[in-house]
Image: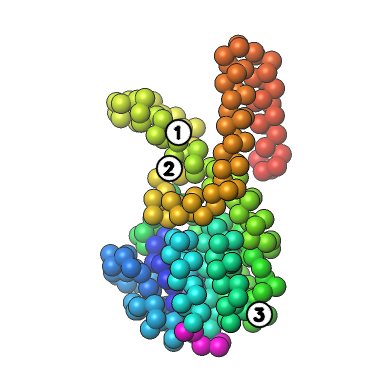
Amino acid sequence: MNITIIGTGLIGGSIAMAIRGFSTKIIGVDNNEENLKTALELGIIDHAMDWEQAAMISELIILAIPVDAARALLPKILDVISDDCVVVDMGSTKAGICNNVRNHPRRSQYVASHPMAGTENSGPQAAFADLFKGKKTIVCEQELSSVFALSQAKLLYKIMGMNILYMSPEEHDKHIAYVSHLTHVIAYALSITVLEIEKDEKKIFEMAGSGFDSTVRIAKSSTSMWTPILQQNADYLIASIDKYMETLNNFKTAIQEKNQARLYELIDEANKIRKVLNK
């Protein structure tokens, strides 16, 4: 079985490592020549090709590139693949890419998905086989994918060690805005704030505790990946930012007014997340 992975960074590279042994040949496609070279040198992929050449000889194509690039490339891939080829994307926003191919003649050969896994690091050198193990993946519009395409996607995620959830693209984008995209905005904003106030970078390093470190860790996430994600999920993300700012202002007011009871109430309310996360 020939599997093509378009995007050989953290996600694409980790997928290649996770499915190694289940494919006759893993073909890598990437506009970043350094990533492609590294992926070959590390044995993550077997061959490097351009996407058109790879698409015509593959049974499975995995799109692991920034969401704006995936949205533009997916229709072109569907135009040239064979009738028995399946395409699965890994994008963190779903409504835009689903709407873009809704009326494509080969829509049934595409499975819209989003594996909920990643780290703040990027590039094939950051990839590892167990990145996805025990994590959840979201599949959208499964009713528009053929039985065969869906079975191939399920097999892929089984090999990767993931559990599948199903929802509409709109549901996905709304919920992900709160549990993922807002988290990144907060981390980026906090990092900028600290860097602007604390001009002495050595002091930041010396004084920063584990709480700060864990909060801003994801601020190191890839600029090229996260800029289009935030743009494509703008409506839901703005709503989540507005709600967050409202809550932040509640904390600010309580602190300004030295209202200990209100602060206790807010923190106590926040502590309830422990029950939700079972931690």
Q: CA distance from mark 1 to mark 3?
A: 44 Å
What residue sits 55% from the left and 58% below the top?
Answer: 93
Numbered disc 2: secondary structure: helix
Q: Is residue 3 above or below residue 64?
A: below
Kindly identify which residue carries mark 1.
190
Viewer-proximal residue, 69 or 191?
Answer: 69
Q: Is residue 108 above or below residue 188?
A: below
Q: Amino acid at mark 2?
A: Ala
Q: Position of residue 82 (x, y in %)?
A: 51, 88
Q: Amino acid at mark 3?
A: Ser
Q: Position of residue 165 (x, y in %)?
A: 67, 61
Q: Amino acid at mark 1?
A: Leu
Q: Quadrant of residue 152?
A: bottom right
Lateral position of residue 37 relative to residue 64, left or right: left
Kindly identify which residue carries mark 2.
219
Mark 1 closeness class: few <14, some 14–19, many ≥20 residues within 10 Å? some
The reply to whether residue 37 is in sight is yes
Q: Are marks 1 and 3 in contact (CB under 8 Å)?
A: no
Task: Write down the region rendered in magenta.
Answer: 80-84
Q: Earlier in the sequence, mark 3 or mark 2?
A: 3
Q: Earlier in the sequence, mark 1 or mark 3?
A: 3
Kindly identify which residue carries mark 3.
146
Q: Earlier in the sequence, mark 2 or mark 1?
A: 1
What residue sits 56% from the left and 72% below the top?
Answer: 101
Q: Position of residue 43 (x, y in %)?
A: 35, 72
For the rendered model, the colour scheme is rainbow
187 falls in the magenta region? no
